Amino acid sequence: MKTHVLRGSKQEIADRLVRIDGEVREVIVFEDELAPARPDAAACEPDDIFAEMASFMVDVQNVDDSREAIYTRMEGE
C-alpha cells in the first residue's frame, strides 16, 4: 500500500485524489475548526492532534513499556 499526503483546499485535494492510480481504500481528513469546541482548545496547536487528550494521559517516569513487560502476567493476574 502506498501513502500520499494531499494538502490544499478541498478542491485541490479532490483534484489530486482523482489523479491517484489504483483503489483508494481509506482517507484521514484533518479539519480546521472555525470555533474551538472548548475554551482551552484554542491554546492547542492545529498540528498537535493529541493535545485535547492531554488531560486524560498518565505521565509516569521510569515505566517499563517493553513488549516483554506488557505481555508478561504479573502476580495475581
Image (cartoon, helix red, strand yellow):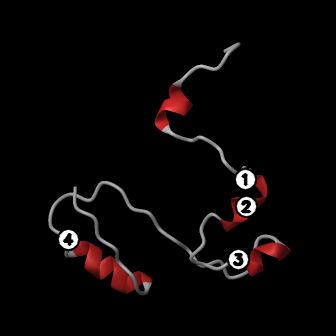
- Mark 3 belongs to which amino acid? Cys
Residue furthest to the left in view is 21
Q: Residues within 10 Å of mark 4 (few under 14, many from 20)?
A: few
- Mark 1 belongs to which amino acid? Met
Cα–Cα span, label 1 and label 3: 16 Å
Cα–Cα span, label 3 and label 2: 10 Å
Q: Nearer the viewer, mark 1 or mark 3?
A: 1
Cα–Cα span, label 2 and label 4: 36 Å
Q: Nearer the viewer, mark 2 or mark 4?
A: 2
Residue at image location 66% in from the left, 48% down from the top: 62
**Label at residue 15:** none
Front in this rendered view, residue 51 or 62: 62
The kind of secondary structure element at disc 1 is: loop
Q: Which of the marked residues, 1 or 3, is nearer the chain's N terminus?
A: 3
- Asked if 37 appears above or below 57 in the picture, the reply is below
Residue at image location 76% in from the left, 74% down from the top: 41
Q: Which of the marked residues, 4 or 3, is nearer the chain's N terminus?
A: 4
**Is label 1 in contact with label 2 (beta carbons under 8 Å)?**
yes
The kind of secondary structure element at disc 2 is: helix
- Mark 4 belongs to which amino acid? Ile
Residue 22 position by quadrant: bottom left
Which residue is under mark 2? 54
**Is label 2 in contact with label 4 (beta carbons under 8 Å)?**
no
- Mark 2 belongs to which amino acid? Ala
- Asked if 64 appears above or below 41 in the picture, the reply is above
**In the displayed structure image, the side of residue 12 where residue 49 appears, left or right:** right
Which residue is under mark 1? 57
- Asked if 30 appears above or below 62 in the picture, the reply is below
**Label at residue 44:** 3
Cα–Cα span, label 1 and label 2: 5 Å
Q: Which of the marked residues, 3 or 2, is nearer the chain's N terminus?
A: 3
